[in-house]
């Protein structure tokens, strides 16, 4: 599923990754920050559960959460942080601390949402990351949670980016849809929605799953297999290209032979 998620993000990232190029070095500061945000998002439900609809999420609560995550990081990810200096860890902590005001504001607003409060309570009462496998699609994946709400399964995943102004990013919609399709095959029950937790902005965003989303996932699985077999996809320019780890090599255009594969 990680390869499919990469495909939804950028087809060329999948191409380079399948040929031995790492998207992130395991000890790069950007990757460590990603891990910190992921660990924080795993505990947002606890923050929401500890706040009533009449109280704001306190900045001191989030700062304490950040300090706890930074303290736990070396025990959870010993290999990844082994080469990171204390000064670099402090730099990462300060970067993440700059996101806390927005996270606080968004979490506070969501204490007023009964649906989000219910979801946060369910997440807190579960510690399973279910392994999902589809023989039909030949795809596996592990969502953060697979909740049961009003008799329906709801896959939950964490993204360490900021949420868009409304809804979810399109590649995240397709990623959560793919989890839904795997869970449907395992449990035999149609899944209507999923949830994306955006770590950098503290948003819990519901996703309604439509037939077109499922169609795009099937198309993505087929195209991803061709890319893994050697087909270089066309380059699609976006605002994220400037900070991409593969930007230098990505200037190579797909050859005519590659396009015909």
Image: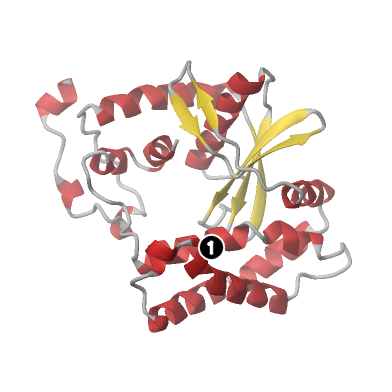
Quadrant placement of the C terminus: top left
Quadrant placement of the N terminus: top left
Instruction: State whether residue 98 appears in this view.
Output: no
Q: State the residue at coordinates (36%, 22%).
A: 222
Residue 31 in the image, given as x and y percentages of width and height: 40, 62
Q: State the residue at coordinates (62%, 29%).
A: 209
Q: Is residue 12 above or below residue 134?
A: below
Nearest the viewer among 228 and 67 is 67
Nearest the viewer among 140 and 56 is 140
Q: Give residue 235's quadrant in the image.
A: top left
Residue sitting at the far right: 54
Q: How is the image coloured?
A: secondary structure
Q: Is residue 86 above or below residue 115?
A: below
Q: State the residue at coordinates (48%, 15%).
A: 136
Residue 20 in the image, given as x and y percentages of width and height: 22, 44
Nearest the viewer among 206 and 37 is 37
Tally of numbered discs: 1
Residue 227 in the image, given as x and y percentages of width and height: 27, 30
Q: Report the residue marked by disc 1.
A: 37
Q: Is residue 66 above or below residue 21?
A: below
Q: What secondary structure is found at the residue carrying circle 1?
A: helix
Q: Give residue 132's quadrant in the image.
A: top right
- Asked if residue 91 lies left or right of residue 253, the reply is right
Label 1 CA crowd tier, 10 Å (few <14, some 14–19, many 20+): many
- Asked if residue 111 lies left or right of residue 216, the reply is right
Instruction: State whether residue 81 appears in this view.
Output: yes
Residue 40 in the image, given as x and y percentages of width and height: 60, 63
């Amino acid at each position: 599923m990680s390869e499919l998620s990469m495909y939804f993000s950028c087809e060329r990232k999948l191409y380079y990754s399948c040929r031995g190029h790492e998207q992130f070095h395991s000890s790069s500061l950007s990757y460590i920050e990603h891990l910190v945000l992921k660990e924080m998002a795993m505990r947002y439900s606890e923050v929401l559960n500890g706040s009533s609809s009449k109280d704001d999420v306190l900045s001191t609560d989030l700062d304490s959460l950040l300090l706890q995550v930074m303290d736990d990081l070396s025990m959870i990810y010993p290999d990844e942080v082994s080469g990171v200096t204390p000064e670099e860890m402090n730099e990462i902590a300060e970067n993440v601390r700059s996101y806390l005001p927005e996270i606080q504001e968004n979490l506070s607003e969501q204490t007023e949402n009964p649906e989000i409060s219910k979801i946060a309570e369910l997440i807190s009462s579960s510690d399973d990351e279910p392994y999902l496998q589809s023989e039909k699609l030949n795809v596996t994946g592990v969502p953060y949670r697979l909740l049961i709400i009003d008799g329906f399964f709801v896959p939950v995943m964490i993204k360490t980016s900021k949420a868009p102004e409304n809804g979810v990013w399109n590649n995240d919609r397709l990623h959560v849809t793919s989890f839904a399709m795997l869970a449907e095959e395992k449990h035999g029950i149609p899944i209507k929605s999923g949830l994306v937790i955006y770590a950098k902005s503290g948003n819990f965003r519901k996703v309604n799953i439509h037939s077109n989303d499922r169609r795009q996932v099937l198309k993505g699985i087929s195209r991803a297999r061709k890319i893994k077999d050697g087909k270089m996809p066309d380059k699609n320019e976006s605002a994220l290209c400037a900070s991409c780890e593969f930007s230098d090599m990505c200037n190579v255009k797909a050859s005519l032979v590659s396009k015909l594969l």
